[in-house]
């Protein structure tokens, strides 16, 4: 152990922590420290052990061996409540706020201020005092004060995260842990979250940040700790190390591209569009959207305002109503009023809200993958052919490198990113000709991105077509044939993408700039 790894003064010292699940050593003798007021990123591939470590620090799991010390004192974190009372606040990917309560009620839940009665506080709630406290905090953290009196389910992902941060402050936390907080956020919201992370830091609060978006590290992290296969690998200054080095540390080898090499062949397309969209409108959301999509093509969709660059995707498959406009399939007008209609016309959405919607936690990975494609695995009328189901699932598990590679494992025991991969496999297997994929690489590590895009390429190379909606411009310029720029609900323009062309790093930069210029000009 080196000096840098053990620190008496650290807010949190993790020493020789190990944690085993049946068949998996999730953490293997991990030692590192979180210093006062630093922003420490925790990075590693899907299944590396990040969330397990987070759960140990937040009192949810007990380590099999090793100790956690807070401010130099060995501490036994007995429960989530215990960790919170000792100054560790954790913001999980799924919010733990009570949806029907407003910001103040959530922040002061269980520790409400009472009205002052002389020098003590009586039985009545000091509602005004609490609301004022929240308002001041909130203004400090995001420079607006809207929505404080609305139930938190109505205020959007970013404000929910901020409310959770404020709850941490109200508990006088010394560490705030965030497990992939930016995954559901748009670029603008992410910047707002970073403002609140900096505000935490300025108050001397340490932040442990788990993320797969490595560019974020350059922007916000003072230091990054890398885990691989449950082991501590290194602690580096991300700006000094640079992204390629970080990736190397995470993956254990060099990864040069998120794009599978199959992309590098020149593409040709049929004349007729498999999908044409004319003047699509949805009041207040989509304006006069017109585009087409050919067989074999990948159309990227970049950047809608706010968190909603998925609205177009939802409208296309009938999840959101459209007010006017026309959708043509193979040249014929079709009516799509529900996802069922869409499926009937060969259009399927891989939705963005995969995490909360599609997981059958108690069922096996095989059952989760085949759920949308029972026709492939039923024998006769309604008997499931278990052997076939298993074989298909095993194929996807190996192509997407789902870890551990065991299709009988219960889905809830997989890491977040591996669950995502299994769900993507499910939608691909369903076999619609046109796939609309929303944020395909959310929560997926840098090495596995090319596996996911590889499946989308396979799909279009065998006659399908795809629309990929993504906030990761970097990837979008590489995997798309064309990129539609929709910054504020209307099409600002189109940029030719890099798929099938031999482009240099600099060329991609030029493409990205072209997209950004269109987006900004329209705003
Ligand atoms: N409750 C559990 N039961 C069994 N195995 C588990 C459980 N939780 C996690 N694991 C296993 O422990 C390993 C580490 O998982 P963990 O969720 O910590 O990974 P992670 O680094 O957060 O990955 P991701 O980036 O995909 O979220 C994985 O192999 C996972 O399958
Ligand atoms: Mg995780």
Image (cartoon, grey):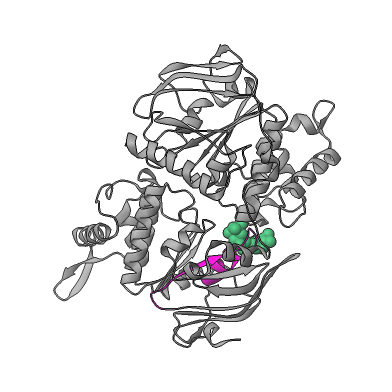
Q: Nearer the viewer, residue 360 or 216?
A: 216
Relative height, residue 389 to residue 420 (above, below): above
Q: Nearer the viewer, residue 401 or 358?
A: 401
- Where are the magenta residues, as a range? 36-57
Image quarter where the N terminus lies is bottom right
Residue 456 location, quadrant: top right
Q: Is residue 130 left or right of residue 100?
A: left
Residue 279 location, quadrant: top left
The reply to whether the magenta stretch includes residue 211 is: no
Q: Is residue 110 visible?
A: no
Q: Residue at x 34, y 72 (%)?
A: 172
Q: Is residue 298 left or right of residue 13?
A: right
**Residue 493, position as x, y percentages in the image:** 42, 30
**Residue 157, position as x, y percentages in the image:** 41, 48
Relative height, residue 301 to residue 92 (above, below): above
**Residue 261, position as x, y percentages in the image:** 69, 45
Residue 343 location, quadrant: top right
- Which residue extends farthest left? 118
The reply to whether the magenta stretch includes residue 40 is: yes
Q: Nearer the viewer, residue 181 or 366?
A: 181
**Residue 347, position as x, y percentages in the image:** 61, 25
Q: Residue at x 41, y 37 (%)?
A: 304
Relative height, residue 418 to residue 344 (above, below): below
């Amino acid at each position: 152990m080196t000096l840098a790894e053990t620190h008496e003064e650290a807010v949190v010292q993790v020493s020789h922590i190990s944690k085993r699940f049946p068949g998996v050593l999730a953490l293997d003798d991990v030692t590192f420290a979180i210093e006062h007021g630093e922003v420490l990123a925790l990075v590693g591939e899907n299944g590396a052990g990040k969330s397990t470590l987070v759960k140990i620090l937040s009192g949810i799991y007990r380590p099999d061996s090793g100790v956690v010390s807070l401010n130099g004192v060995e501490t036994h974190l007995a429960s989530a409540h215990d960790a919170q009372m000792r100054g560790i606040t954790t913001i999980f990917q799924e919010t733990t706020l009570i949806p029907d309560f407003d910001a103040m009620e959530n922040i002061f839940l269980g520790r409400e201020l009472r009205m002052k009665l002389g020098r003590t506080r009586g039985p009545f709630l000091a509602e005004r005092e609490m609301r004022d406290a929240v308002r001041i905090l909130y203004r400090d953290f995001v420079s607006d004060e809207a929505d404080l009196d609305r139930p938190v389910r109505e205020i959007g992902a970013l404000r929910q995260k901020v409310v959770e941060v404020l709850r941490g402050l109200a508990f006088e936390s010394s560490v705030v842990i965030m497990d992939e907080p930016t995954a559901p956020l748009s670029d603008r919201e992410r910047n707002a979250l970073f403002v609140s992370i900096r505000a935490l830091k300025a108050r001397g609060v340490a932040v442990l940040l788990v993320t797969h978006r490595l560019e974020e590290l350059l922007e916000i992290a003072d230091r990054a700790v890398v885990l691989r296969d449950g082991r501590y690998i290194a602690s580096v200054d991300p700006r000094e190390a640079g992204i390629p080095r970080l990736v190397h540390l995470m993956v254990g080898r060099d990864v040069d591209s998120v794009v599978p090499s199959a992309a590098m062949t020149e593409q040709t397309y049929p004349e007729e569009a498999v999908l044409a969209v004319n003047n699509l409108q949805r009041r207040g959301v989509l304006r006069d959207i017109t585009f087409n999509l050919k067989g074999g093509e990948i159309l990227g969709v970049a950047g809608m305002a706010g968190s909603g660059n998925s609205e177009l995707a939802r409208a296309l498959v009938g999840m959101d109503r459209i007010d006017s406009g026309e959708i043509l399939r193979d040249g014929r007008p079709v009516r799509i009023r529900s996802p069922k209609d869409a499926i009937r016309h060969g259009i399927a959405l891989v939705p963005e809200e995969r995490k909360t919607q599609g997981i059958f936690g108690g069922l096996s990975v095989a059952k989760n993958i085949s759920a949308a494609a029972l026709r492939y695995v039923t024998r006769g009328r309604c008997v499931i052919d278990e052997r076939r189901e298993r074989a298909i699932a095993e194929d996807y598990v190996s192509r997407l490198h789902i870890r551990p590679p065991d299709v009988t494992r219960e889905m809830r025991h997989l890491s977040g990113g591996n669950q995502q991969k299994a769900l993507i496999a499910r939608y691909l297997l369903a076999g619609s000709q046109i796939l609309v994929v929303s944020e395909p690489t959310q929560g997926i590590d840098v090495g596995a991105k090319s596996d996911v895009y590889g499946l989308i390429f396979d799909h279009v190379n065998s006659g399908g077509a795809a629309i990929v909606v993504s906030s990761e411009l970097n990837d979008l310029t590489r995997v798309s044939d064309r990129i539609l720029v929709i910054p504020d609900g209307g099409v600002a323009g189109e940029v030719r993408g890099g798929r099938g062309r031999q482009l240099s790093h600099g060329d991609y930069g030029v493409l990205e700039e072209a997209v950004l210029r269109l987006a900004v000009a329209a705003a």
